[in-house]
Image: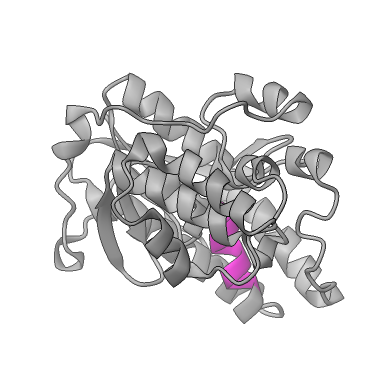
């Protein structure tokens, strides 16, 4: 069995922003994108798992200003977003997880698949997803890539240096992607967190643990309670890549086939 693990929030957000006043077109964009994600990687029998944000967010409990700089949404856009969320839940059996975000749920599913030696592809456009080792498909850019354990860890550690202004997560002032890459250039995976802490200390930027915990996605259901209470003591360090991930052969768009998916009645 192969899995297509889809960050549904990014799909209906994108559809709603471009078609806030047209529910028919919104549905078409959602359906087309989900089919594209599901068909991208697999010709064998597969399962499509669609992740939706649930109620509440443990990151808000840890850090009240999380995403606090985002502007208020217009009423028509709010309605379109609610419609898109409900449509994905009903049409594509979207799964909500209270207390977390859609990409957290995708990450949990990915780690469960690793443990079970199942092939999977992470489908989405959020940069947070790149801390998940495995095959990825960006439906916006129409490209796929394989992220190994080392690259996944590096992606997270780089963001621990820069922070994330879109989510209002603190980073080191004056350090962007290029400077962050320079700081971690040549640093082995097991030593990167120490380098990150040293950079924060050198720049008198405070304690990096909060930013790390806000940026790091959940990998197990048990972590939700742990993170809500205490945060992580140490960052996740991956030490292996299952052989099953090496065997996935993503297909080009010219050979896309869609099987096992229902069609939309307009």
Viewed as shown, does residue 212 lie left or right of 152? Answer: right
User: Bounds of the magenta span?
Assistant: 8-16
In the depicted structure, whether residue 221 falls above or below residue 127: above
Viewed as shown, does residue 266 lie left or right of 119? Answer: right
- Magenta region includes residue 14: yes
Q: Residue at x 39, y 49 (%)?
A: 154
Q: Position of residue 105 (x, y in %)?
A: 55, 37
Q: Residue at x 42, y 55 (%)?
A: 263
Q: Position of residue 218 (x, y in %)?
A: 57, 34
Main SS of residues in magenta:
helix
Viewed as shown, does residue 119 lie left or right of 23? Answer: left
Give the quadrant of the C terminus: bottom right
Residue 145: tell me if it is visible: yes
For residue 121, what is the image quadrant? top left
Q: Residue at x 78, y 69 (%)?
A: 70
For residue 153, what is the image quadrant? top left
In the depicted structure, whether residue 133 falls above or below residue 18: above
Question: 25 or 6: which is nearer to us?
Answer: 6
């Amino acid at each position: 069995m192969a899995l297509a693990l889809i960050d549904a929030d990014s799909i209906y957000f994108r559809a709603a922003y471009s078609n806030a006043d047209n529910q028919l077109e919104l549905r078409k964009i959602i359906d087309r994108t989900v089919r594209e994600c599901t068909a991208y990687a697999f010709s064998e029998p597969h399962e499509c798992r669609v992740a939706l944000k649930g109620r509440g967010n443990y990151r808000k409990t840890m850090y009240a200003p999380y995403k606090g700089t985002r502007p208020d949404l217009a009423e028509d856009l709010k309605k379109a977003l609610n419609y898109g969320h409900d449509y994905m839940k009903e049409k594509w059996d979207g799964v909500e997880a209270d207390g977390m975000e859609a990409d957290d749920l995708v990450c949990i599913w990915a780690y469960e698949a690793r443990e079970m030696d199942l092939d999977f592809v992470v489908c989405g456009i959020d940069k947070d997803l790149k801390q998940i080792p495995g095959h990825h498909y960006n439906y916006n850019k129409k490209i796929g890539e394989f992220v190994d354990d080392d690259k996944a860890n590096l992606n997270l550690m780089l963001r621990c240096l820069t922070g994330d202004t879109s989510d209002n997560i603190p980073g080191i002032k004056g350090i962007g992607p290029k400077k962050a890459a320079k700081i971690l250039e040549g640093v082995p995976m097991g030593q990167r967190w120490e380098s990150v802490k040293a950079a924060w200390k050198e720049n008198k930027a405070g304690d990096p643990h909060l930013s790390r915990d806000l940026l790091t996605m959940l990998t197990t259901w048990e972590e939700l309670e742990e993170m809500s209470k205490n945060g992580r003591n140490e960052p996740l360090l991956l030490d292996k890549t299952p052989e099953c991930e090496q065997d996935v052969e993503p297909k080009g768009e010219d050979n896309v086939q869609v099987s096992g998916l229902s069609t939309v009645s307009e």
